[in-house]
Amino acid sequence: MGLFRKKRAEVIRRGVGDTATEERTTRRIGGSTVEITRVREVAQPATPKHTERGPRTGRESRRRSGRPEQEVILPPPSTERKQMLVRRTPFQTQIVVLEGALLVEHYVARSDRPSLTHNIYLGKVRNVLPGMEAAFVDFGEPKNGVLYAGDIQADDGHRRTRIEKALKVGDDVLVQVVKDAMGHKGARLTNEINLSGRYVVLDPNVEKPSVSRRLGDAERDRLRDIARDISADLRLDQFGVIVRTAAEGAPKEEIRADIDRLLTTWNEIMEAVPRGAAPRLLYEEPPLVIRVIREHFTRDFRRLLIDDPAIFEQVVAYLKDTDPDLVSRVQPYEEEIPIFERFHVEDQLRKALDRKVWLPSGGHVVIDRTEALTVIDVNTGRFVGHSNLEETVLQNNLEAAEEIAHQLRLRDIGGIIVIDFIDMEVSKNRDAVLRRLRESLARDKTRTQVFEVSNLGLVEMTRKNESEGLLESFSHLCPTCAGRGVVLYEEAATSGTAMPHPEDEE
């Protein structure tokens, strides 16, 4: 057995990290000339001690510490011809965005499950849980919503109070729906009300005017100056102003008119508060089509096609009031072929509902949802490459990074996402894949955050979870396996009975 005993690895040279210097000398020993290499570690500068900070206030207290600030990557200028399509059926209204022929975004409003997001209610507190720092609020729906202590409007000193001191059972409270109820979870509520318009958002958490980072520096400076002037003229003490991407190129008069409309809406809400008992709806957001157009339909789009006359008239009326220059790009769709079939949307939606997505070179990614997070696995599949393994893996991972960003946007996947790229030995290649992922995600208007590769070689990221994803909108749990994906034989485990063979059940 001695022949098969493993030898202990001999250490030729110990690593000293990335910062090292080498000294090479040549010596003659016996009759041979040998080269001796000495590796010396470079002394690292002393890490400065962290200075003590004062107490955090407002939303800052809810941020996680220890995360490095990430580089802001602006989306590249779109070279594809973008268009938006609207299809209405007796059961639902669907809106899709195409870049060229590629389907990149999908929105749906179901007639049996209307969205409550951004609606404003006068709610009544039903239960206060100090241990969870939350309260359950009845706002008129079958399931109570949850209001966390961090989502309660702070006082003038920006200091948060404990939930049991801020709210009592039976209190009336003004709330806005942040996220619709999903599964067994009730709707997420906030007491920090914001109002969204075509060009701006009025938000109480913004102390000074801010502008979308998706715009260039010159345009951001122009819009910031406009927002400051309007805020000073109107004395917006209660609200801060966030200027949206849609305001690019908009004159000051149109931005001022948008803010005036929002202030009128706010005054109407406050006047309606004492007119009745809670729970009660005070403000209802416009239909999904108008919300999507308000937030996404900009001058980048070539056209907007609508197959329903009533929705067409509604959209034209909205744009005439808010952005008349875009009215000419709205067109009715009157061809005999259904609009989604005409633009090959149906085939792309079928593929987007599958868990496996094929890459151009033959590799594939597998997307699986769990209760806590979404897991994405990258595989080479049929792709065997040409030169060497590292180059093969790099090309496959680069393709996967672009496709993952596309699928997250199309499927509207939110929350925590973990990506298992194929292992690469060269650190430069790992950085290139991470960079490609961030650049591809820059096209997504939903807020994302990508962290560095973990010790296990996984890429962790988050994407803001705003609504049901594509899969959740068109599926329900399997009644047989309750979503586990397997058929259980409990009797075989507990009583020792025989398990049937799969072919016997066919």
Image: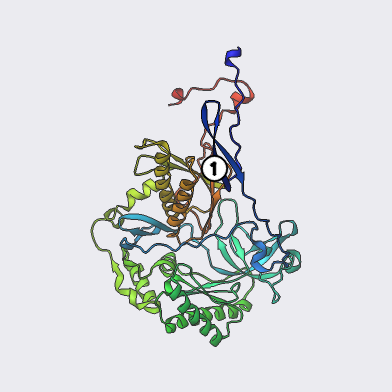
Residue 371 at least partly seen: no
Closer-to-camera residue (410/77):
77
User: Horizontal placement of 153 versus 320: left or right?
Assistant: right
**Where residue 126 appears, x then y in whole percent?**
69, 62
Judging by the rendered image, the residue that carries numbered circle 1 is 457
Residue 316 at least partly seen: yes
User: Horizontal placement of 341 versus 1: left or right?
Assistant: left
Closer-to-camera residue (211/37):
37
Residue found farthest to the left: 336
Residue type marked 1: Gly
Q: Residues within 10 Å of mark 1 (few under 14, many from 20)?
A: some
User: Horizontal placement of 41 versus 422: left or right?
Assistant: right
Q: Residue at x 61, y 63 (%)?
A: 189
**Where residue 171 appears, x then y in whole percent?**
71, 69
**Where residue 163 appears, x then y in whole percent?**
73, 64
Q: Secondary structure at mark 1?
A: loop
Residue found farthest to the top: 1
Closer-to-camera residue (78/386):
386
Q: Residue at x 50, y 63 (%)?
A: 72
**Residue 299, picture quadrant:** bottom left
The quadrant the N terminus occupies is top right
The quadrant the C terminus occupies is top left
Closer-to-camera residue (301/133):
301
